[in-house]
Image (cartoon, rainbow, N blue to C red):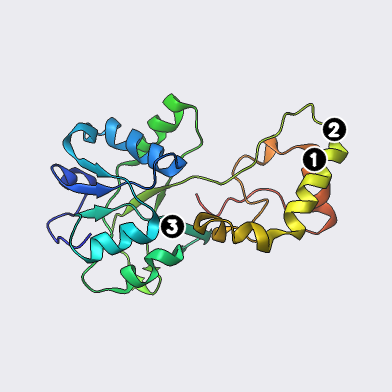
Amino acid sequence: MKDPSIKTINDLKGKKVVMASKGMAAGYVNQYILEKHGLWDKIKPQYMGYKPGATALADGLVDAVIVMITIPGPGKYSVVGAFTELLASKDVHLVHGGDEKTILAVGEEKNIEVIPVTLSGTFDGKPVPRGVTTFYQGVQWDVDETMDDEIVYEIVKILYENIDQIRATHPSMKVITRASLPNVSTAANFHKGAKKFYREVGLNVGFKGIQ
């Protein structure tokens, strides 16, 4: 945000808010959160990619933009490349993104994994305002549990060995690394074939640092 009067999600009433490109999962989740707070019909949603959204906010064409945060570990936060310069600006600040109970309720109602995260410390070297809450949503590939173990093993191996090409396909994929591939909060749901591969390369399945 550039407007200092916008301090929480409730201050977005009547504002132009960049959601994300249409069709992106994060855009839908943020819409659900705004709906749950009774705000969706009170904002002016704008749909555009990361870089155009960052530029629009910097140029004063919109009031707020929902940024994509990477959470590589406890107390560590960063943003995708399009927002790096924007967040370095003294004119831009982070705001509270909704209360934890509401975010959890969205996950339960929509049957999606959405985990509240309260930021603290620094964000790309910039102090985080006290009480800024957002949510964690993992990027994942789903397979049927009946799929042959060796086929899943080979798929995961291909992903692991070709991670650089995958990262280059879209800005949102740049948050994925070989080490972070098995970082999920629902490790019990991992397919046996995937677990077998990660054990062989010395990676633990599951990631509790986001809590």
Picture coordinates of residue 10 (x, y %)? 19, 43
Task: Give the residue type that dot 2 points to.
Answer: Asp
Mark 3 Cα within 10 Å, few/some/many (few <14, many 20+)? some
Apparent side of residue 72 relative to residue 178 in the rendered image (left or right):
left
Name the residue located 67 percent from the left edge and 61 percent from the top edge.
Answer: 165
Residue linked to disc 2: 148
Does residue 132 lie above or below 28 as drawn? below
Mark 1 Cα within 10 Å, few/some/many (few <14, many 20+)? many
| Depth check, front residue: 51 or 210 | 51
The image quadrant of residue 169 is bottom right
The image quadrant of residue 160 is bottom right
Does residue 182 lie above or below 167 as drawn? above
Q: In terms of secondary structure, where does tag 1 sit?
A: helix
Quick check: can you spot residue 119? Answer: no
Sequence-wise, the earlier of marks 3 and 1 is 3
Residue linked to disc 3: 69
Q: In terms of secondary structure, where does tag 2 sit?
A: loop
- Most extreme residue toward the right is 150
Apparent side of residue 189 relative to residue 44 in the rendered image (left or right):
right
Check whether the beta carbons of the residues at disc 2 and disc 3 lie within 8 A of each other.
Answer: no
Task: Give the residue type that dot 1 points to.
Answer: Val
Q: Between marks 3 and 1, how big is the CA–CA gap?
A: 29 Å
